[in-house]
Image (tube, rainbow, N blue to C red):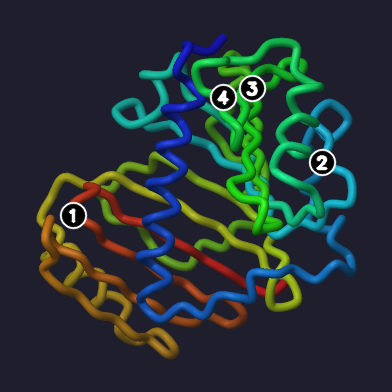
Amino acid sequence: MYTQSFFKKISISILILILAVVFVGCQGNQDSPTTPTDSGSNDYILEGYPIDVVPLFEGFSISSMKYFVNDDPNGYALMYGGQVNYYNVVLKVDASQAEFINYYKSLMSSIDEDYTSESSVEGMIGIYGVEASKYSDDSSDAYLQVYLPTSDFEKENPYFTDYPKLFEAGSDWTLRETSYGELNQLDGQIEYTLYYTFNGDFETEFDTFVSNHSNETNITYEDQIGDYGYEGSIKWQSDEYEITVSFNESHGRIYIMIRKPM
């Protein structure tokens, strides 16, 4: 179902996406406090998450839960045995690193020892590939990635039924990944992310995009030539939605993040 190094390599994709979101955030996005409110934290469990098979650690509080559809043949999909759907969960737990890791080890029918350490374990729980991580005893942050079987891959994100179409993607953009998340911050937020690959001139494409959206509410934008190519971001407000679009030539990608209150 999965190649030996699937989980380790797909984790790199998550890291790259996180770095992209951090880049977006540096463009003026106001993030929430890192500690979620305990009240109603169960509300952030996405309907469809296989909690009966891959339970959340006892006493958890959810910081965020997201569902990804990755369909990038050059980056992270076909190289690892097929395109992937997966959940990414950030938890707050009152447990040591060893307690958290050992709990998920106890649920696994098989463990990939090559990619298991004191801070992380990878293996199979039922039909799901699972990576559980906790990087420090000094932090309550813990992480789960739950991968659905590649044979069951669905290209359409099932959580995008209410996705707001607030802009037109460029004709030369190719959609490679989407995610839907519910975030326990700022009294609760919904987040949509997408990334597209793009092989054209990033600076020209950015200028065109800014020009086409110059009448949006509360628009801000900035750009620069970075160490590895052109970088630009644009942000605006549309009713309750905050939209950020980031052009990153070094990744060959255009990233979109859309948030609104829950």
Label annotation for residue 116? 4
| Residue pictured at 79% horizontal, 48% vertical | 95
User: Does the image show residue 20?
Assistant: yes
- Which percent across, then down, holds residue 198? 22, 47
Q: Earlier in the sequence, mark 1 or mark 3?
A: 3
Q: Which mark is residue 129?
A: 3
Badge 3 vs badge 2, beta-carbon distance below 8 Å = no
The disc, 4 or 3, on the residue closer to the chain's N-terminal end is: 4
**Picture coordinates of residue 86, whole percent (x, y):** 60, 34
Gap between marks 1 and 3 measured at Cα: 32 Å
Foreground of the two, 243 or 21: 21
Which residue shows up at 52% across the image and 76% down it?
A: 242
Name the disc covering residue 249, or none. 1
What whole-number distance in Å separates the C-alpha atoms at marks 1 and 4?
34 Å
Picture quarter with the C terminus: bottom right
**Disc 1 marks which amino acid?**
Glu
First in sequence, mark 1 or 4: give its number: 4
- Give the quadrant of residue 116: top right
Rendered position, 161 above or below 70: below
Secondary structure beneath dot 2 equals: loop
Looking at the rendered structure, the kind of residue marked 2 is Leu
The quadrant in which the N terminus is found is top right
Assign a secondary structure to mark 3: strand
Report the residue at 10% width, 56% height from top: 201
In this rendering, which labeled residue sits more in front, label 1 or label 3?
Answer: 3
Q: Earlier in the sequence, mark 4 or mark 2?
A: 2
Q: Label 3 sits on what residue type? A: Gly
Say if 102 sits above or below 241 in the image: above
Residue 56 bears which disc, if any? 2
Residue 240, image quadrant: bottom right
